[in-house]
Amino acid sequence: MTDETASRHDRVRHHPTPGPGNSLADWPRARHPLRVALSYVVVWLIRISPSLRLKRWLLRRLGATVGPGVSWGLEATPDVFWPDLITVEAEAIIGYDATILCHEFLQDEYRTGEVVIGERAMIGAGAIVLPGVEIGAEARVAANSLVTQDVPPGTTVAGVPAEPMGSSADADDVDESDNTDEAEIGDDESEY
């Protein structure tokens, strides 16, 4: 992660859109329609191909930076408009049906931001990563999570929005206390 104090909002570029319509209605000014059409076809191939080697090759042709050994799951979708703003470092895993977004179309502007997924990071099935987010090395994003802020290296996040999960030591403490409570309840019931 480049700067511990910066948030995704600090790294996202704002592009005002003129006129009465919303920014999505004005998308051909943001990105050439032929480029988006070609990207869409290539993204479709990336989504359905079972070959990880082909997926990496196609992602690189779209301009994404993809490290060696990256595993891109079936139906996972890179940003169609700005795939060149995606960096996925070595041995990272992008799970089934995950979405990596590098743009947001809003009413009066659109925003773009690079997404960086660190070495050996894992993005769970159905997760969505928003523009400007950096996911640190060996970080984990649980399935169906919405990543709205950076994920520090080695951290596990889950939820909507994704929040850090407790440590495994905390989880062990909860499990042990739960078992103790059940044993005590069982003992109380046997006395009756």
Image: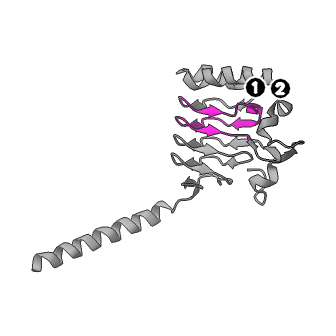
Residue hosting label 1? 36
Q: Is residue 145 above or below residue 66?
A: below
Residue occupying the far right of the picture: 18
- Residue 9 horizontal side relative to residue 137, left or right: right
Q: For numbered disc 2, what is the local secondary structure? A: loop
Residue 159 appears anywhere in the view: yes
The disc labelled 2 sits on which kind of residue? Answer: His
- Residue 89 horizontal side relative to residue 31, left or right: left
Query: Which residue occupies 56% across, 44% down?
Result: 127
Query: Which residue occupies 82% across, 30% down?
Result: 28
Please state the extent of the stretch shown in magenta in the rendering. Answer: 75-103
User: Which residue occupies the foreground of this view, 54 or 29?
Assistant: 29
Residue occupying the far front of the picture: 20
Distance of label 2 from label 1 (alpha carbons): 6 Å
Residue 103 picture location, percent across and down: 75, 41
Q: Is residue 98 magenta?
A: yes
Query: Which residue occupies 10% across, 80% down?
Result: 191
User: Which residue occupies the foreground of this view, 85 or 121?
Assistant: 85
Residue hosting label 2? 32
Residue 77 picture location, percent across and down: 62, 32
Would you say the residues marked 2 and 1 are in contact, meaning their CB atoms lie under 8 Å apart? yes
Q: Is residue 43 above or below residue 183?
A: above
Q: Say which quarter of the image contains residue 85.
A: top right
Residue 122 picture location, percent across and down: 56, 42
Query: Which residue occupies 28% across, 73% down?
Result: 181
Q: Is residue 184 magenta?
A: no
